[in-house]
Image (cartoon, grey):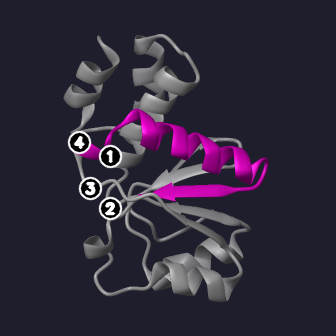
Amino acid sequence: MSLSIPNLLFVEPNHYAGGYVSPEALEQVKAAGITHVIDMLPDNEHGGFDEAGLAGELGLFYAHLPILGGHDLSRDNAEALDRLLAEAGDSKVLVHCMSGNRVGALFALRAHWVQGLPAVEALQVGRRYGLTKLEPLVIQLIGL
């Protein structure tokens, strides 16, 4: 599948993670059969693009879970991500932020705090989902 999304990763069956989604990329998402979009960008990072509005026009399920930075890497947000993924069931889901780093960080925390994976395994999950610059903070939060 070819989508013009930076750092796009196909991680698990039906899970995609990546960076910024433009209007054109969102149309590609729909054409690719992805039905759920979880957007971790804060409002000020959309550059004037109404992602929620276009997602609605395209018939996509859209959820906004803004993660501005490290202070938003919380148990509450990890649990919110888990609920959104559970609601999606077996549907194809794209989770994105600007680069994919915040996506990976929250997936690592979800793996540890919600799913109960050991810290080392949770960190590996985060890396598979795009964790990069926030890794030192994630390591601290999961107690490695």
Q: Are marks 1 and 3 in contact (CB under 8 Å)?
A: no
Tell me which segment is drawn in magenta.
71-96
Q: Are marks 2 and 4 in contact (CB under 8 Å)?
A: no
Q: Distance between the residues labelled 1 and 2?
A: 8 Å
Query: How far across and how far down the image is residue 134, in percent?
Result: 24, 37
Disc 1 marks which amino acid? Asn
From this view, report whether residue 49 is shown above or below residue 127.
below
Q: Are marks 4 and 1 in contact (CB under 8 Å)?
A: no
Viewer-side label of 3, 2: 3
Label 3 neighbourhood size at 10 Å, few (<14), some (14-19), many (20+)? some
126 left or right of 68?
A: right
**Badge 1 element:** helix
Query: How far across and how far down the image is residue 94, in percent?
Result: 57, 58
Which residue is labeled 3 in the image?
Answer: 68
Taking the magenta stretch, the answer to whether it contains residue 13 is no
Numbered tag placed on residue 101 in the rendering? 1
Label 4 neighbourhood size at 10 Å, few (<14), some (14-19), many (20+)? few
Reading the chain from its start, which is encountered first: label 4 or label 1? 4
**Badge 2 element:** loop
Q: Which residue is pictured at 49% across the width and 31% down the height?
A: 110
Q: Do the residues labelled 1 and 2 touch (CB within 8 Å)?
A: yes
Disc 2 marks which amino acid? Met
12 left or right of 119?
A: right
Numbered tag placed on residue 98 in the rendering? 2
Q: How far apart are marks 1 and 3 (CA)?
A: 11 Å
Picture quadrant where residue 127 is located: top left
